[in-house]
Image (cartoon, grey):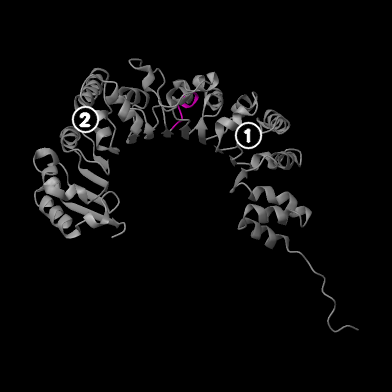
Amino acid sequence: MELFPRLRSVLNTDIMINIMTMSDTRTVVRLMLLCRDLYHEGPKHLRRHTLRLSRETCVPSFVAFMKAEHHQRLRYLKRLRISIADLSKAVSDVLEHFIVECAPALQIEELTIDHAEDFFKSSLGLPGCFALLHSIKRLSLVEVGKHADTFLTSSRSHLLSAELEMIPHSSPDEDSSDEEEDADDDFSFRNPILQLRNSQDTLESLTVCSSDTFSDFGVFYEQCYPNVKELILSRNEAPKTTHYTRAFPNLQKLDIAVDSRDHFELVEYSDLDPIETCRHFRMLNKFEQQQHGPWTTLKTVRAPVIDHYLLGLIRPVEQLHIAGPIMGKKMFHSVLGVTRPVYLSLDGFDSAIFLDGEFKSLVRGPFLETVRALEITLFLGKLLAPELVDVPQALNALVDGLAQMASLRSFGLTIHCYGL
C-alpha cells in the first residue's frame, strides 16, 4: 500500500483564466493553446489590448483567427491598429472580403491607420469596405490623401474623436511633372469640416495636422459640429476664423499653430510690407466675426503670438497660452487688449525675452491688468548660445517686470536648461 498516492497533475482553469486577465496579447494567445476552455475564453481578454497588424503576412492569420468559432470572436475586437504601408492584391482581397462579410458583427471602437493613403491605395475597394464599419468612436489616420478621404467621407461610423494628419502641400520650389501628384495636391482631402460631416452630431474632439479650409475663401460651410469642445490644429493654414466659429460654434479649447510656409506665403504674395499684411489679415478676421458672430463659449486658446494676432479674436478669453520662442510686443499687446485673460502662460521662451528691458516693457501698461495668474516656462540655452545666457540678469529682469503687475495673485516659473 502506497503511503503517498500518486497525485495527478490538474490544470486549474480558474487560475489560468485569472492569469489571462493580466497578460499581454502574446501570452493570452499561447495560453489559448493549452486547453479547450482557455481556447474559448482567450478572445474575451484580447479586447483590452490594441490588435496591431504590422506586416502583410499578419493579415491572413488575423482574418482566420477572427472568423474562427463561427464568428463569435468578432465582438471582442475593440481596438485595431494597421501599420502596413501597402498590401498585395491577394492580401487586400482577403481583407476586403473579411470586412464586407463581417462588418455588421464587428464592433471596432478605436481604429488607427499609420500609413492611411498608401494602405487605402492598395485596392480600389478598401476605402469603401472600411467605410462599412459602423461602430468606430475614435479614429486616427496618418498621411490622409484622396484615397483616405474616400473612406472618411463615406464612413458609416459616428465618431466621438478624430486625429487626422494630412499629406502636406508640395513645396512651391518642388518641380513635379507627375499629373497624379498634382491632382493629389487638391485642398479637398485636407478639409476636416467636409470629411467628417457624417459625425456632425457626435464629434467632441478634433485634432488635425496640415488642414486646409482656407481655399474656400468667402464660402461658409453648412456643416456644423455643435458638440466639439476641443480643436487642435498644427502645421495649419493661416487661420480663417469664421470657418472655425461657424463649424465649431460651442468650442471651449483651441490650440493652433500655423505652418511656417503659410506665414511666408502670406507676406510673400502681398503688395504690403509684412506688418501691414498681418494687420490687414487680422482686421478681416475681426470684421467677419463682427458680421457673422464670434465664439461665446471659448475659454482657452494656445498659439504662437503671431497666430493669436492673425486669429483676431474679438471677445475675452479666460486662459491665454503664448507658445514660444518668438515674441512680438505690439502683437502681444494687441491680443491681450482684446482677449483680457485671467490666466496667462508664456511657454517655451529663452532668456532673450529678458534682454534690454524687453520683459518689463512687455508687461507694462493696462494690457495685463486682468491677469491674476501668470505661468512662465523658460528653455534657457535652447535658442541663444549657452555662453550668451545670463541667468542672474534674466531673473532680475523677471522680478522687475513682475513688480509692475499689481493685479497678479499667483505666479509659476519652470526653467529647463540646455548646455548651461
200 is within the stretch colored magenta:
yes
Q: Quadrant of residue 224?
A: top left
Instruction: Determine the residue located farthest toward the top in the rendered image.
Output: 219
Check disc 1 and report the residue beneath it.
Answer: 86
Apparent side of residue 171 relative to residue 307 in the rendered image (left or right): right
* x, y percent for residue 381: 28, 54
* x, y percent for residue 29: 70, 52
Q: Is residue 68 above or below residue 178?
A: below
Q: Is residue 352 visible?
A: yes
Judging depth in this view, the residue of 382 and 201 nearest the camera is 382
Task: Tell me the magenta residue range.
Answer: 197-203
272 is within the stretch colored magenta:
no
* x, y percent for residue 83: 59, 40
Can you tell which of label 2 and label 1 is closer to the viewer? 1
Judging depth in this view, the residue of 411 and 386 nearest the camera is 386
For the residue marked with disc 1, what is the amino acid? Answer: Asp
Judging depth in this view, the residue of 144 and 317 nearest the camera is 144
Identity of the residue drawn at 33% across and 35% down? 256
For the residue marked with disc 2, what is the amino acid? Answer: Arg
Judging depth in this view, the residue of 238 and 370 nearest the camera is 238
* x, y percent for residue 415: 27, 56
Q: Earlier in the sequence, mark 2 or mark 1?
A: 1
Apparent side of residue 18 relative to residue 296 in the rendered image (left or right): right
Q: Is residue 72 above or below residue 93?
A: below
Per the image, label 2 sits on a secondary structure element best described as: loop
Q: Quadrant of residue 412?
A: bottom left
Apparent side of residue 28 relative to residue 289 in the rendered image (left or right): right
Task: Say which mark, if any, is on residue 315.
Answer: 2
